[in-house]
Image (cartoon, rainbow, N blue to C red):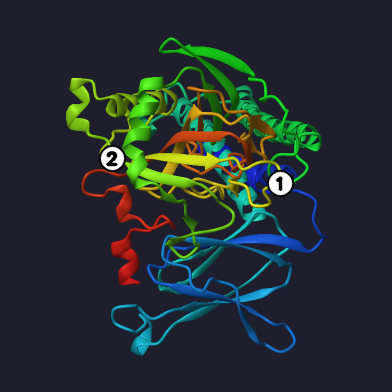
């Protein structure tokens, strides 16, 4: 009976005092947001319905449907919209490409709706059956508070049960005399558990605020536009240095879901020549993702590129390209705990930028972009999660790489490499924009780089080219 009374009192204290207090804490420690209008709210739609969908904004006065998707969102793909509190959207199922019908009753296309609320960090999950789940900062706070309390309550209950007799006949057990002092100690330990949990959350929130504050301060004099304001600006200083395989590594950003490193003398002149010789007959205009699963030419990226297949059968013979590629995977596995293998990975990419002088109004460059998803959402198997850029030729003027959201500027150095990853190996969440980067215009000279985009979840049966540029398998997209 005493055990039941203590547990009942514990539940009452949690529901009436601790849970509301924790909820207030989590709500008042959100991720800092950038300056915006009072009612402006970005919102991300993530399609998990197994069907193609479209998104329309409903005009509040005329009820006119205004298309917001481009034109559809494939299953497992996402789209972010800039919206406002109170705006309502219609989610519409689209007919399957093969059958021309929908999966609703009588093969009708199903619809659903959601409305933007006043909370931050809004994500709309479109689930099976076109059910809509709306997540935001308040929902996350609710979940975080309940999770923390459940963990602490579980520990308290274990101590109560351990101190209680196991049966009526076991009245002489250690819990038979559970009294006020023992009860008070258990409640005190519950309080301590909650305090420690809150302290950890405060530490994480403060670290996020401090990091973003440092970025904003550094950005003011660093970048005046999307890419490079100061051609003479030196590379951002590393916060620490380590040695890997005899090479000096500069750790510039070291966050769970975003890491940026520089590695000196990563490749050799002979390896660069081998790559250039293989690339020479294959060079073509570089393309970018078109937002619908394909790719196209764009003024945002001006360069020549060529994909180079690695002849792994010649690795033991000392093939230079295979040797270089193995070094890439060795470094990735040194930093990330995934044991990445070469099977199914993308080809090495030779990319070349050419300077045509300061008067060129359309210089070779690459505007800000992310190599993989950078929306802070769950990782999608088979997609990119790290990149290594290796420098074979560096221009006389221009050609630096800017990570504008992290306040990082890297001038290319011959035979060096820049590594960056955009996944948290623990939570499997993607980076939230800190590894977005741009290639500064090449003004004079040539910039020749070798790039390896590294994927997680590919193999010989599911190679990189079985996925479209939205990260969806072609076979799955064809069924939608």
Which residue is rendered at x = 71% and y = 61% of the image?
41
Residue 150 vertical placement versus 97 (above, below): above
The residue under label 2 is: 309
Residue toward you, 68 or 345: 345
Which residue is rendered at x = 79% and y = 56% of the image?
36
Residue 68 vertical placement versus 458 (above, below): below
Using residue 478 as the reference point, say whether residue 315 is left or right of it.
left
Residue 457 vertical placement versus 298 (above, below): above
Which residue is rendered at x = 62% and y = 55% of the image?
139
Residue 304: x and y in percent read 46, 46
Residue toward you, 109 or 303: 303
Q: Secondary structure at mark 1?
A: loop
Using residue 418 as the reference point, say whether residue 267 is left or right of it.
left
Looking at the figure, which quarter contains the C terminus? bottom left
Residue 272: x and y in percent read 39, 27
Residue 381 vertical placement versus 442 (above, below): below
Residue 156 sits in quarter: top right
Which residue is rendered at x = 41% and y = 28% of the image?
332
Residue 222: x and y in percent read 76, 34
The residue under label 1 is: 359
Residue 258: x and y in percent read 56, 35
In front: mark 1 or mark 2? 1
Residue 166 sits in quarter: top left
Report crowding for label 1: few under 14, some 14 to 19, many 20 or more residues within 10 A (C-alpha). few
Regarding residue 381, the answer to whether it shows in the image is: yes
Regarding residue 268, the answer to whether it shows in the image is: no
Q: Secondary structure at mark 2?
A: loop
């Amino acid at each position: 009976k005493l055990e039941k009374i203590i547990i009942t009192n514990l539940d009452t204290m949690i529901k009436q005092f601790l849970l509301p207090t924790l909820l207030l804490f989590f709500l008042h420690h959100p991720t800092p947001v950038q300056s915006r209008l009072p009612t402006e709210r970005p919102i991300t739609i993530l399609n998990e319905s197994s069907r193609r969908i479209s998104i329309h904004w409903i005009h509040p006065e005329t009820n006119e449907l205004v298309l917001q998707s481009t034109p559809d969102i494939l299953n497992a793909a996402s789209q972010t919209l800039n919206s406002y509190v109170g705006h309502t959207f219609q989610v519409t199922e689209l007919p399957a490409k093969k059958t021309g019908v929908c999966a609703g009753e009588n093969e009708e296309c199903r619809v659903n709706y959601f409305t933007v609320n006043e909370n931050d960090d809004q994500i709309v999950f479109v689930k099976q059956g076109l059910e809509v789940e709306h997540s935001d900062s308040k929902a996350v706070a609710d979940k975080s508070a309940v999770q923390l309390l459940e963990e602490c309550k579980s520990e308290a209950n274990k101590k109560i049960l351990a101190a209680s007799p196991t049966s009526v006949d076991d009245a002489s057990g250690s819990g038979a005399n559970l009294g006020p002092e023992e009860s008070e100690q258990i409640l005190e330990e519950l309080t301590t558990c909650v305090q420690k949990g809150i302290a950890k959350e405060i530490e994480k929130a403060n670290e996020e605020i401090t990091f973003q504050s440092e970025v904003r301060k550094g950005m003011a004099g660093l970048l005046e536009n999307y890419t490079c304001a100061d051609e003479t600006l030196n590379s951002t200083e590393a916060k620490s240095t380590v040695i890997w395989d005899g090479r000096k590594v500069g750790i510039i950003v070291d966050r769970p879901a975003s890491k940026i490193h520089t590695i000196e003398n990563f490749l050799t002149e002979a390896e660069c020549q081998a790559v250039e010789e293989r690339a020479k007959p294959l060079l073509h205009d570089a393309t970018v993702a078109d937002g619908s699963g394909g790719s196209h030419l764009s003024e945002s990226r001006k360069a020549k590129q060529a994909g180079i297949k690695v002849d792994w059968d010649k690795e033991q013979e000392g093939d230079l390209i295979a040797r270089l590629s193995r070094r890439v995977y060795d470094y990735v596995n040194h930093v990330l705990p995934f044991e990445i293998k070469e099977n199914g990975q993308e080809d090495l990419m030779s990319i070349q930028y050419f300077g045509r002088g300061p008067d060129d109004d359309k210089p070779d460059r690459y505007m800000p972009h992310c190599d993989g998803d950078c929306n802070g959402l769950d990782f999608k198997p088979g997609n990119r999660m790290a990149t290594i850029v290796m420098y074979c030729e560096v221009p006389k003027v221009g050609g630096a790489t800017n990570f504008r959201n992290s306040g990082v500027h890297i001038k290319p150095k011959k035979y060096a490499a820049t590594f960056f990853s955009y996944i948290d190996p623990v939570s499997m969440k993607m980076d939230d924009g800190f590894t977005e980067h741009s290639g500064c215009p090449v003004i004079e000279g040539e910039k020749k780089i070798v790039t390896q985009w590294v994927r997680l979840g590919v193999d010989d049966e599911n190679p990189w080219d079985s996925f479209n540029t939205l990260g969806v398998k072609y076979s799955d997209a064809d069924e939608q």
